[in-house]
Amino acid sequence: MIPRRAPTSQPPARIAPLATLPVFHKLQGRFVVLAGHSDGVRWKAELLAAAGAEVRLFAPSGAFAEPFADAGIRLQDRSWQVGDFAGAALAIGDFDTDDEAAAFAAAARKAGIPVNLIDRPAFCDFQFGAIVNRSPLVISISTDGAAPVFGQAIRARIEALLPPGLAHWAAAARDWRRYVQASRPAYALRRLFWERFTERAMAEPERRPDAGDRRDLLRAFARDRQAPPTGRVSLVGAGPGDPELLTLKALRALHSADIILHDDLVVPEILDLARREAERIRVGKTGHGPSCRQSDISALIVQEAKAGKRVVRLKGGDPLIFGRATEEIDACRRAGVPVDIIPGISSAQGAAAALGLSLTERKKARRIQYVTGHGEDGLLPADMNWAALADPVATTVVYMPRRTLEGFVREALAAGLDPATPAVAVVNATRATQTHRRARIDALPAALGDLPETGPMLVMIGAVIRDADLADIEMNSLQMAAE
């Protein structure tokens, strides 16, 4: 009898320590004290003026080879004085010596003004990051002064990912916000509007939004206010463990979820990618250990969706492969709850890729068969097609056979499986803790003694795991362990 457990609510992970707090400073209509005459000062003057600040630049006349084109930059032909800081929003300087920098910083702080000294982080209250400008969409990247060139390289990557046209959509969001806020809608309705807006923007990022877009979105918003939308359910595959194997669609679902019901096999790093406000509930099943009843899980899914929430049922691997998806889909349909499925990378695909194996091969492996290693009672299923499992031109993947592998091998050999067929058992596929053992199928059960006792395990059997691959498999595993 497998012990039962109740679904368990889990708080999101705490925010990891931050080297610095990212903030965005409003400078329109305010002035900034800027002192010095280096190239860095010139760049800061142009940056601050672009953000709407009046820049009072204290530098000798003629210090800059070219005049400033922006009227907001006012050159003061003298050194800074203590009284110059009164009422300033920020103070920024670039000096030749630490004594000059320390004096400037002390005067600014005495006036209650945040200060930045270019390339002197020890004197800084704040720092400038590398900027991706799609204003009013602005992204800043900081390395806490440790590696500015690294931050600039990351900025270049982000620049390539964000089409310049997104600036037009960000401007439209700013302009249309008042239409959404006017009726003081509930938070869920506001979020739904902006999710639709985002879907449209990301689908056509280079197109300038127009009055037609605004009309369509506001009409849908009005319909939602009259009849608030019902909740919905997404069955989402989390993949075998490596967070980078999540699909983009799965990631979008996690970002829009109100509640996430997840298996034990879902690693914390994937849950950390979800919307922070989303409630997380552990509804896992442990092989031969305490497990939530499927009926309880299905009932909870329907209950939360009927309360108007967006429910993500997050499953390790692919939800359609030994994920009990049918019961949950049927429960939603009986209750009239919309449900969609977002497939994931299966554990078999992840394990094969991590070991550098192909699951099929001409002449040697013409088909793949996935079978479960245990039934509801935890024992080897009684209705296995042993003749099919003995097929020499099939690759067989056995899920969750930790306690039944010996019996599985015995029955398969009795049905005609060649005892010399190569096989490999993989635990924690694609994770940093991945490990495996390989052997002939008749010797594999005895080779598993030193494998970890916890973590998902699967066994791959077939000619694709041939001797020529074994050196490469060992090398891949050694590299992963070293990393």
Image (tube, helix red, strand yellow):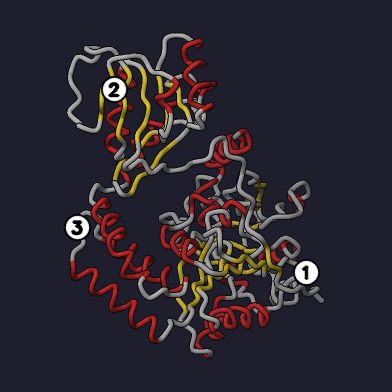
Where is 160 relative to 86, above or below? below
Task: Nearest to the eye among marks 3 and 1: give it.
Answer: 3
Of 389 and 217, the residue lying toward us: 217
Q: Which residue is mark 1?
A: 290
Image x and y of residue 388, in percent: 56, 71
What crowding class fits label 3: few (fewer than 14 Cα within 10 Å), some (14-19), or many (20 or more)? few
- Left or right: 359 as drawn, with respect to 161: right
Question: Considering the numbered disc 3 on the image, is that residue within a helix, a strand or a loop?
Answer: loop
In which quadrant is the N terminus drawn?
bottom right
Disc 2 to disc 3: CB gap under 8 Å:
no
In the picture, the disc for residue 207 is: 3
Q: Is residue 33 above or below residue 434?
A: above
Instruction: Assess disc 1: are there few (<14), some (14-19) or many (≥20) residues with their C-alpha within 10 Å of its C-alpha.
Output: some
Amino acid under disc 2 = Arg
Q: Nearer the viewer, residue 231 or 457?
A: 231
Foreground label between 2 and 1? 2
Per the image, the residue denoted by label 2 is 42
Which residue: 76% across, 53% down? 453
Tell me the distance, in whole angstroms, between the alpha carbons under discs 3 and 1.
Answer: 53 Å
Is residue 54 placed above or below 406 in the rendered structure? above
Marker disc for residue 425: none
Q: Amino acid at mark 1?
A: Pro
In what element is the residue under mark 1?
loop
In the displayed structure image, the side of residue 77 where residue 363 appears, left or right:
right
Going 60% across and 69% down the picture, which residue do you hit?
A: 261
Mark 2 or 3, nearer chain start: 2
Cβ atoms at labels 2 and 1 below 8 Å apart: no
Q: Earlier in the sequence, mark 2 or mark 1?
A: 2
